[in-house]
Amino acid sequence: MHKPNIPKPLKKIWRFFRPFVRQSLFPFLGLVYSLICWALMKTVRMKVSGAGNQKKVEAAGKKYIYGFWDGRQLMLFPFAVGKNLVILASTSDAGEVLTVIHRFFTLKVVRGSSSSDGVRALKAMIRALRSGCNGALAVDGPQGPPERAKTGIIEMAKMSGAVILPLSAGVRKKFFIDSYWNRVQIPMPFTSGRYVIGKAIEVPPTANRQDMDKMLALFQLELDRVTKESDEFFPIL
């Protein structure tokens, strides 16, 4: 992608004001976004399918990691409330806004991504999972390609002992923001939809690279399946 040629004086001005913007404006934007998201999702009637898959994991005394597509996060924020989740937020400017949103919906936050501080972030997530938290990960982030799972969640499950739960959300009426790589989905007010929790996937601590590649392919198939299920709405006859 071609980068615009920004004059040096403007770059210097931005570098001067950027700390203020990150510390003041971005948290404000995050709070505003959170309130709008909360108010919007309060109007949407959501049901849960596949809850039994999660209950089996909990009954076995195991922790879990939700794996989902980045573009559906807005619909998933309310679902996260009260589940003792830890999630990754990138170190980018967008991550500053997301951090506020995540905390608004009771998620704990680890900063980092596969493209920035990846090893440190992975270790921090694993420590949080081992200490008793459950996890959440946008598996196609931070830059896509959209709806193609990356290996991070498999490595996280192997090293932490947590079980992977594919998760999707879909609504009847929505619109898309196509200008973003993840094609963000936004529900229309007063529509209805569902959350779908897929079958649990366990990654043995002894898994080698070939095993992990197979587990990633299995996870991709299951997340594709629950995504399709969350988007299937049939007319009432």
Image: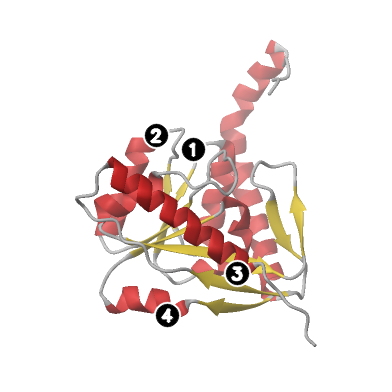
Residue 235 vs residue 201: left or right?
A: right
User: Disc 4 vs disc 3: which is toward the camera?
Assistant: 3
Q: Badge 4 is on which residue?
A: 52
User: Disc 2 vs disc 3: which is toward the camera?
Assistant: 3
> How many residues crowd around disc 3 within 10 Å: few (fewer than 14), some, or many (20 or more)?
some
Q: Badge 3 is on which residue?
A: 229
Q: Residue at x 36, y 42 (%)?
A: 121
Q: CA distance from mark 3 to mark 1?
A: 33 Å
Ranked by sequence position, the earlier of labels 2 and 4 is: 4
> Which x, y percent locates residue 215?
36, 52
Say what secondary structure mark 3 lies in: helix
Q: CA distance from mark 2 to mark 4?
A: 36 Å
Q: Badge 1 is on which residue?
A: 91
Q: CA distance from mark 2 to mark 3?
A: 35 Å
Q: CA distance from mark 2 to mark 1?
A: 8 Å
Front residue (pair 118, 52): 52
Q: Residue at x 80, y 88 (%)?
A: 237
Q: Are marks 2 and 4 in contact (CB under 8 Å)?
A: no
Residue situated furthest bottom in the rendering: 237
Q: Residue at x 36, y 49 (%)?
A: 214
Q: CA distance from mark 4 to mark 3?
A: 16 Å
> Which x, y percent locates residue 173?
77, 68
Q: Are marks 3 and 1 in contact (CB under 8 Å)?
A: no
Q: Badge 2 is on which residue?
A: 117
Q: Amino acid at mark 2?
A: Asp
User: Disc 2 vs disc 1: which is toward the camera?
Assistant: 2
Front residue (pair 15, 142): 142
Q: Amino acid at mark 3?
A: Glu
Ranked by sequence position, the earlier of labels 4 and 3 is: 4
